[in-house]
Amino acid sequence: MTSISSYKKNWMRYENYLMSGEWHVHTNYVDGANTVDDYCKRAVELKIPLIAFTEHVRRVLTYNYRDLVEDVMRARENYPDLIILTGCEAKVLEDGSLDVSDEVLKQSEIVLMAFHSLPGSKDKYIEALTTALSNLRVDIWAHPGLFLRNKNLSLSEEEAEEILEKARKEDVLIEFNGKYGLPLEEWVEIGKKKGVKFVRGSDVHKVGDLK
Ligand SMILES: [Zn+2]
Ligand SMILES: [Zn+2]
């Protein structure tokens, strides 16, 4: 799937579709309501040019990732004008590593990293985040700042600048997530000034979430 290329990050092949594509979709392999085929059919109707199936993963999976990859391969034959990518959404662990197996990484074209809880303190969060941003396989930081906000914490301007500078340097895209209203306006401002790139990811869990 993921072949050797001259691109530093896989997303760079599809740079023209960062805001017109949908880069964060869950299927019924985990907690989504629909199949790969359902989403592709709807994406074509809506003239969405690219869709990335970024299913939840753990190091030990509850489903066979290969099945998802095969669904995507079939969909590519059925919807030749739609760009359909395999992917995963991996949780950042306390040490900044990702909760995903090498086997899944090998088959994933797009890798989202996300926090699904806050590791201890804000300092620990920043540390884990910085490590995860350095991970060469990470393409996108999904729902950035969600768990800070949930815990009523925020980054200082200086901290936000450092993190966003790191994302720019490592070519990690920042998810523009309309569903959660993230990232915060201040982060968008800082990011734009720094030349950080944003990508549309709506954490889609059903066909009706596609816009
Ligand atoms: Zn998530
Ligand atoms: Zn998600």
Image (cartoon, grey):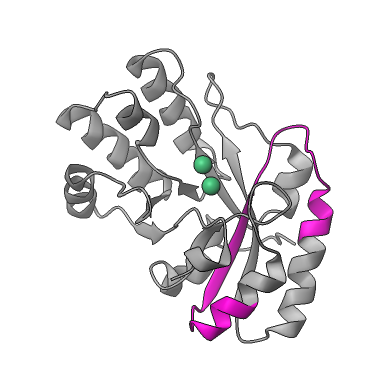
Q: In the figure, 190 relative to 206: above or below? A: above
* Residue placed most toward the observer, 160 or 186: 186
Q: In the figure, 14 relative to 188: above or below? A: below
Residue 83 locus on image (x, y percent): 60, 76
Please provide the residue range marked out in magenta.
41-68
Query: Where is the C terminus found, in terms of image quarters?
Result: bottom left
Q: Is residue 60 left or right of residue 19?
A: right
User: Which residue occupies 54% across, 85% down?
Assistant: 45
Residue 207 locus on image (x, y percent): 57, 67
Q: Is residue 127 magenta?
A: no
Q: In the figure, 205 relative to 95: above or below? A: below
Q: Is residue 169 left or right of residue 47?
A: left
* Residue placed most toward the observer, 189 or 147: 147
User: Which residue occupies 47% across, 49% down?
Assistant: 140
Query: Where is the N terminus found, in terms of image quarters?
Result: bottom right
Q: In the figure, 8 relative to 71: above or below? A: above
Q: Can you tell which quarter of the image residue 199 is in?
A: bottom left
* Residue placed most toward the observer, 207 or 182: 207
Residue 119 locus on image (x, y percent): 46, 18
User: Which residue occupies 45% across, 37% down?
Assistant: 133
Residue 16 locus on image (x, y percent): 42, 74
Q: Is residue 63 magenta?
A: yes
Q: Please state the total of marks drawn on the protein image.
A: 0
User: Which residue occupies 79% across, 43% down?
Assistant: 103
Q: Is residue 163 left or right of residue 114?
A: left
